[in-house]
Amino acid sequence: MRVFLVLIVLVLYPNMVFGQPIKVSIGSDVNEKGQVDLFLTLENTGSHAVLHIHPMFHFHHSMSMMTAIRELRPGQKITLENYQHPPVLRVGTYPISAMVKYKTLEGNEKTILHSDSFYFKEPVQSQIGGSIQSSGGVSSSILKIFLKNQSDSLKNIRMMLLLPPGMVAENFDGMMGFTLRGKAGKNFEVRVQRGPNVDEDRFPVRLMVEYGEMLKHYSGEIKGVIQFTPSWYSVKYLKHFTVLTLMGLILAGLYFRFYYSLKKGNTNG
């Protein structure tokens, strides 16, 4: 039973058991250009305050001093930011270590070493561009899709058309694929059936394009709008157009009636 309790304490409070009241953790953020931001978090998990804390990072055979902390009380946590890490250029895992020196209330000097790592992934950009245009009637619309291979090498591409709920593409079942030679373009059309009980006429649509090359996966998307009926007309305004048309016919009828009555009166006179 005692051994079991000791194991629990070791798991939950390792710093206290091994005489290190400060819990150290390292966070990192690497952007597409290889710029590295580091975050060092210090937490006093002990029962007494620690004093004169001097944290620093070690990377690439250099040292970066960070802001000194005068005191860290029990339960207190603080995060320090460091932007001094050199930019990384190659894909891979980079080790990072932090050293934290501090003093106890008794004046004893202590040192904590903590190691971690971050991963840099080379950004990949799709070389397939294009556009989506739309034209059609009330019940269906035709998407006119243009794709362009902007590189010099051929691409075996796969595509997936993302439509609003209820819309169905007649000749685009799930995934489609073909080969585009370097600098080549391709036009094709996709007829889309309008969904039932839909009042709107314009909907966003996306074409997901992906291909593989040299053990890398490239993906991108082409955005467009699917349009049912002409741009100046909308099904949801059908009632309004009907009322306006009837009012126009009534006014025209009254006008001609008044015009002919007036003309007839002048003739009799």
Image (spheres, rainbow, N blue to C red):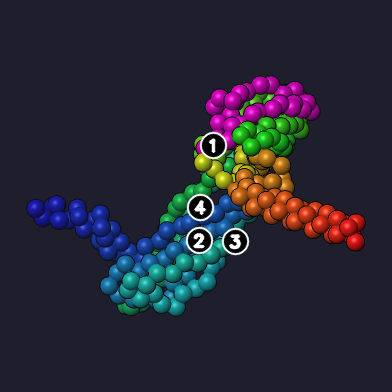
Dot placed on the residue nearer the N-terminal end, 2 or 4: 2
Is residue 25 placed above or below 193 in the rendered structure?
below
Dot placed on the residue nearer the N-terminal end, 1 or 4: 4
Identify the amino acid type marked 3: Tyr
Asked if one can make out residue 132 in the rendered structure from this viewpoint, the answer is no
User: Which residue is pictured at 59% across the width and 32% down the height?
Assistant: 193
* x then y, percent, for residue 127: 71, 34
Mark 4–mark 3 Cα distance, whole angstroms, equals 13 Å
Q: Which residue is mark 1?
A: 195
Q: Is residue 182 magenta?
A: yes
Mark 1–mark 3 Cα distance, whole angstroms, equals 52 Å
Identify the amino acid type marked 2: Phe
User: Which residue is pictured at 42% across the width and 56% down the height?
Assistant: 114
Neighbours of disc 4 within 10 Å: few (<14), some (14-19), many (20+)? some
Dot placed on the residue nearer the N-terminal end, 1 or 2: 2
User: Which residue is pictured at 62% across the width and 39% down the height?
Assistant: 206
Identify the amino acid type marked 4: Ile
Mark 2–mark 4 Cα distance, whole angstroms, equals 11 Å
Neighbours of disc 3 within 10 Å: few (<14), some (14-19), many (20+)? few
Q: Which residue is mark 4?
A: 96
Magenta span covers which residues?
Answer: 167-196
* x then y, percent, for residue 240: 64, 53
Is residue 207 placed above or below 41 in the rendered structure?
above
Dot placed on the residue nearer the N-terminal end, 3 or 2: 2
Q: Nearer the viewer, residue 261 or 139?
A: 261
Question: What label sits on residue 39 in the rendered view?
Answer: 2
